[in-house]
Structures are given as structure tokens and as C-alpha cells.
Amino acid sequence: EGQYKGLSNYSFHDKFMFGVASAAFQIEGGWNAGGKGPSMWDVYLHEHPNYTLDSSNADVTADSYRLYKEDVSMVKDLGVTYYRLSISWPRLLPQGTDNYVNEDGVRYYKELFETLLANGITPVVTLYHWDLPQSLMVLGGWANPVMVDYFEDYARVAFKLFGGLVKIWTTLNEPHQHCSNGYGTDFFAPALSSHGVGEYLCVHYMLLAHARAYHLYNNYFKATQGGKIGITLDAFWAEPKVVNDPQDKIASERYMQMHLGMYAHPIFSKDGDYPLSVRQRVDAMSHHQGYSRSRLPYFTPEEVESLRGSSDFFGLNHYTSYLMTPSSLEPNWKVPSLDHDTGVRIEQEPSWPKPGASWLSVYPPGFRKLLNWVSNNYGRDIPIIITENGVSDTGGINDYARVDYYNRYLYQLLLAINIDHCNVQGYFAWTLMDDFEWKDGYVSKFGLYHVDFDSPNKTRTKKLSAYKYQEIVSTRLINFDTLDKRSLRRTV
Ligand SMILES: O=S(=O)(O)CCCN1CCN(CCO[C@@H]2O[C@H](CO)[C@@H](O)[C@H](O)[C@H]2O)CC1
């Protein structure tokens, strides 16, 4: 659990990439400005005004479409030299397809990338952070194999237009969250609730789309542009509820394979394809449920080959951990779902602090354990970049919980790098400023900067955690005694 006082006994080496992250739909606003086409999230929120906790939407949010120069100065103020952001597909291609490129979208992103570079900040660009053009959603979105072609066309436009400015690309953000929450349930848009069927089609075609964009870049753009391209996956850490209970340990490993291995194994393992345990489990369950074919599609041998090794780095988003125990076969076993296929009951440890979102408990050792799981399963040669990590609260400038979270999670990262030799080469704090937090609307705050969403200029204000992150980035080590509650009381 580490010493958690004084100065950390390890530091981040000089080449370690420190950054901060955001996403187009969550901060841009300008939902229909400058010829932007509607995304499926725009449409879903307009059609379901009470979907979010505060009945809000992202039509304006932090208004970064207008205020991006201020955002760049905030990134610079943190002292980081990398900024992870995403391109809004429908702002660039309003119809989703590459027959019509929106000049205002080209202007906006070129100005944003040039402003970042002029301030010594390297843009790290995600092509897709969930805001699918509505015109493609009506075709079934990621459940439709045609998306592989349309994503390739979109990637080609982005590489062509911005490849001179952008040298680090990520194809997809968190396909697992997008597919399970948006296609498997109604927790996220498009809320298709196609449990155990649509969600696996989404997995399958997002992975194939990723591989297509990866090879497009490597075959047609890398020689002249010289950049790197990868994918961002997400994972909770699955902690056995009883640490040495063999059944709980099996359940934890099964959870990791079904929720991370399903995406990581096809790309980062030496054999490729879905993990054997995942393949067999879904095939068997599908057969048991009377399906004549598995609910998880098969890759052809060529597709397995195209996916294998299709990433220059392992982008990983991590927030929290859950306790795992095997779940008895549900009575309604006829109803398929990823959760039912996994056969694990997840619960939260009451002693782990929960400063904000209901799903986010603070368990720093889970971060180190997850990094070792990734390194043990996929090798220590693939560079890992933490593309998101952070904690939510419900507001305020003196965000002690976030100061504590960054101290402890970055300390665990130091242990994973220095003791366990996990090859982590970069870290992006989620997120630059308070933004639209999906189902939580503006209730859950993840920002290092506070945003006053009621003010005309969406006033940004530095939080305590921004000073803390600035300190870690500049000193490259953790000082547990500054900027927390104790330091303000000057006791102990
Ligand atoms: O357990 S519950 O059934 O109650 C619902 C699970 C809730 N999920 C968990 C993870 N989170 C996705 C991570 O989402 C990522 O992290 C950030 C913070 O959420 C987002 O703002 C980023 O856009 C996204 O990349 C979204 C909500």
C-alpha cells in the first residue's frame, strides 16, 4: 500500500510523457456550428432530454469550439507537453461519408493543432471518442460491417488533412465501454440494449475498423509523416473478493479476459484472435441457449493476421477496481448478455473512498495490479501509455480527493515502472476541465480546472489538483505532504 508520506522514493524519468486528456463531444459544444453534422449523441440527448442526471445535453458544454485558445493556455500552464483530444467525426464529415468535407471543421482542427504546436505541446489525437455521425447510426452503427469501410475513409481524410501536424494517433477510445454500455444496454447512447448480440457485433467491427485504419496509416502515410498509431482500451482491475479463494481468483481472471482480453488479445498477443477462454465460453453459452451460431462472430484467418500487432502502443484508461466472485447461473439464463456470459458478480469494497461517481471507488493498488496483468499477458516490450486516469467529485476548487487520488495512483505507477518493470511511457490525466460526463451530465466533475457552465464565457478556474499535477510534472516525483488537507492545517 506504499508509505504515502514525504517524498516518493522513485521518480519519473525525463523522457516520461506527461499529458492531459479531453474529448470532442465532452468539451467542444458548437453541436451544429460551422456546418457540423449531428452525432448520434446529439440526437439521443435531444430525443431523451431527461436521460442525464441533470437533464442536460452537450450542445454548448465548455464551448471549446469557441474557447480552444484558452484551453491551450490551460494545458500549457500545467507544464505538460502532450494534449490528448479527439476529432468530432461529424464536424469533419457531416454526412459521415467522405463525399463532403466540412471546411470549417478543417479550419477548427488545423488552428487547434497549430496553436498546440506553437506552445510546445504535442497533440495526441483520437479519431473516435463515441460521437458517431447520425447518418451512420441509422445504418446500425458499429453493428454494421460497413462501418469498417466508412471508418477507413474517415481516417484517410484525417491523416491526409492533419498528418503534417499530428504524429501520434489513436483510432478508438474504449470500444469496450462504447459497445457494452451503448449496444449491450441502455446505459449509454445509442442505448440499443442488444444484450449479448449487438454488443459483440460492435466489438467485432470496431476491432476490424481499428486494424483497417492502422494498416492504412502504416501503408500510405507513415513513410511521409513518420508518426505512430495505436488504440485506447479501458479496464477496471478485477480483485478477487477473498484474495486467496480459488473460485474468486478464477472469476477475476475470467472478468479480465471477457472485459479486456477480448480487445487486447487480438491486437497485442503473439497468436492474435479472441482469447481461447472467451471464444469457448461464448460459443458454449450460445449453443446452450439454442443459437445455431455463436453470438461472438469469428475472424477469418486474414482478419486475425490483420489485427495481430496492429498497434504501436497499448493505450490504457483506468479509474477503479471491483471485487469479484463467481455468479451462479442466472435463473434467466436464456437471456444472453456479456455480463451473463462472464458469470461474475462484481461489487464495491465499502472501505474504498467514493468521492464522486457511483461507479468510481479509489483503490490505488488496483492500478499497479492491472499494469502487471497487461505486462504479464502481452509482454513488457509493448509501450503502455495511460491515456486516461482520474477521479470525479461533485465540484469545488479545493478538490482534496483528486489531489489524494493523483498522489496515490501516480505512486502506484512509479512502483509498477520501477519495481515491476512495466513499460509505461506516458500518462494523461483525465481531464483538463469539467466537462459533459455522459449520463452524469455536469453532476460528476473530473476536471483539473473548474468550469462555471452558467457563465457566458464558461469561466475556467484552476483547482488545487491542477497545482498538484503541475508539481508532479515539474518535479517528476510525488510529494505527499503538499496541497492536501494536512498541509493546510500545518499540523503533523
Ligand atoms: O457500473 S455501472 O453499471 O453503474 C455503470 C458503469 C459506469 N461507466 C464506467 C466507466 N465510465 C467509462 C469510462 O469513460 C471514460 O472515462 C471518463 C470518465 O467516465 C469519460 O469521461 C471518458 O469519456 C471515457 O473515456 C463510464 C461509466
Image (cartoon, rainbow, N blue to C red):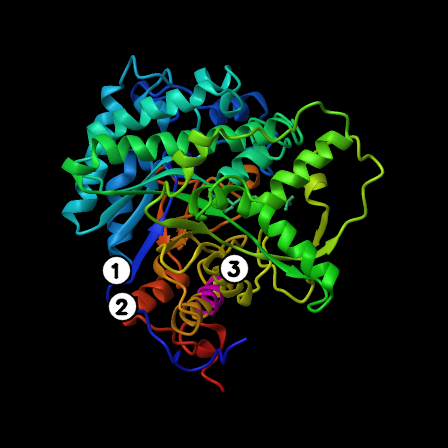
The reply to whether discs 2 and 3 touch (Cβ–Cβ < 8 Å) is no
Element assignment for label 2? helix
Q: Earlier in the sequence, mark 1 or mark 3?
A: 1
User: Residue 106 vs residue 288: left or right?
Assistant: left
User: Residue 90 vs residue 197: left or right?
Assistant: left
Is 405 part of what is drawn in magenta?
A: yes
Q: Mark 3 points at which residue?
A: 373
Quarter of the image for residue 355 reads: bottom right
Q: Which of marks 2 and 1 is nearer the N terminus?
A: 1
The reply to whether discs 1 and 3 touch (Cβ–Cβ < 8 Å) is no
Is 284 part of what is drawn in magenta?
A: no
Amino acid type shown at disc 3 = Trp
* Mark toward the viewer: 1 or 3: 3
Q: Mark 2 points at which residue?
A: 474
Q: Does the rendering let one see residue 379? A: yes
Q: Give the range drawn in magenta.
A: 402-409
- Return the residue nearer the eye: 403 or 473: 473
Up-down relation of residue 34 to residue 464 (above or below): above
Up-down relation of residue 85 to residue 482 (above or below): above
Element assignment for label 1? loop
Amino acid type shown at disc 1 = Gly
Cα distance between the residues tagged 1 and 3: 31 Å
Element assignment for label 3? helix
| Residue 423 location (% of width, % of height) | 37, 62
Residue at 54% over, 40% down: 274
Quarter of the image for residue 487 reads: bottom left
Residue at 44% over, 68% down: 416
Q: Specify the label residue 79 is tagged with.
A: 1
Q: Specify the label residue 400 is tagged with.
A: none
The reply to whether discs 2 and 1 touch (Cβ–Cβ < 8 Å) is yes
